[in-house]
Amino acid sequence: MHAGVLVNGNFEMSPRKMNNTVIVGRDSLPGWALRGHVEYVSSGPQPGGGYLPVAAGVHALRLGARASAAQAVAVRPGAAYALTFAATRSCATDEALRVAVSPSLSAPADVAVRTLYGAGAVDEWAWGFRAADRDTQGLSE
């Protein structure tokens, strides 16, 4: 756990175990705890058409329905932090990410993902929170 910094935040370290693009095992992706169907994808042209833009680095996670990626981060109680992230959606239906920090003095947020996959752009956010405890768990689902 590093003070206020995500480990493998741009997914630069590959998963230890995969089945094609699907990450196998809750702790297979260094720094992250995964739940549900999570894929490790690379930027660029995609099989079957389309183009996947990635905001930073060359890899991203594709979260299935009710899937999540979480990480514990050491923080200073009472200090303000910003979690920055980018996302794009993979179909025309409305999609949202739930961003939560636990424990925190800030409520979880449901963030609408508006940019359609393959449009050559991503939605980027900075989500602020005030830490309530020294060990904080961040979650996206």
Image (cartoon, grey):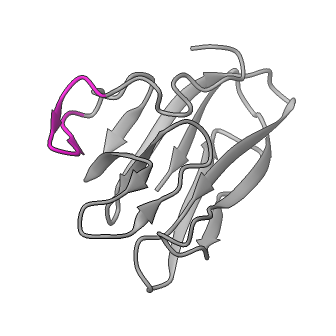
Can residue 36 be seen here? The reply is no
Residue 16 in the magenta stretch? The answer is: yes
Q: Is residue 88 above or below residue 31?
A: below
Main secondary structure of the magenta stretch? loop
138 left or right of 128 in image = left
Q: Residue furthest left?
A: 19
Q: Position of residue 88 (x, y in %)?
A: 53, 64
Query: Can see residue 109?
Result: yes
Occupied quadrant, residue 135: top right
Q: Residue at x 31, y 70 (%)?
A: 49
Q: What residue do we see at 87% from left, 29% from top?
A: 79
Q: Going 61% across and 24% down the picture, which residue do you hit?
A: 73
Q: Position of residue 120 (x, y in %)?
A: 57, 65
Q: Residue furthest top?
A: 2
Q: Is residue 26 above or below residue 8?
A: below
| Figure label count | 0
Q: Is residue 88 magenta?
A: no
Q: Nearer the viewer, residue 102 or 70?
A: 70
Residue farthest right in this picture: 79
- Residue 14, percent from left and from top: 34, 26
Residue at 29% x, 48% y is: 39
Q: In which quadrant of the rendered image does the N terminus lie?
A: top right
Please determine whether, in this image, residue 121 is positioned above or below residue 55.
Answer: below
Based on the displayed image, in which of its 4 quarters is residue 93 positioned?
Answer: bottom left
Q: Is residue 18 left or right of residue 49?
A: left
Magenta stretch: give its range: 15-25
Q: Please state the horizontal and vertical placement of residue 116, each as a whole percent of the image.
A: 52, 75
**Frontmost residue, 48 versus 135:** 48
Q: Nearer the viewer, residue 36 or 120?
A: 120
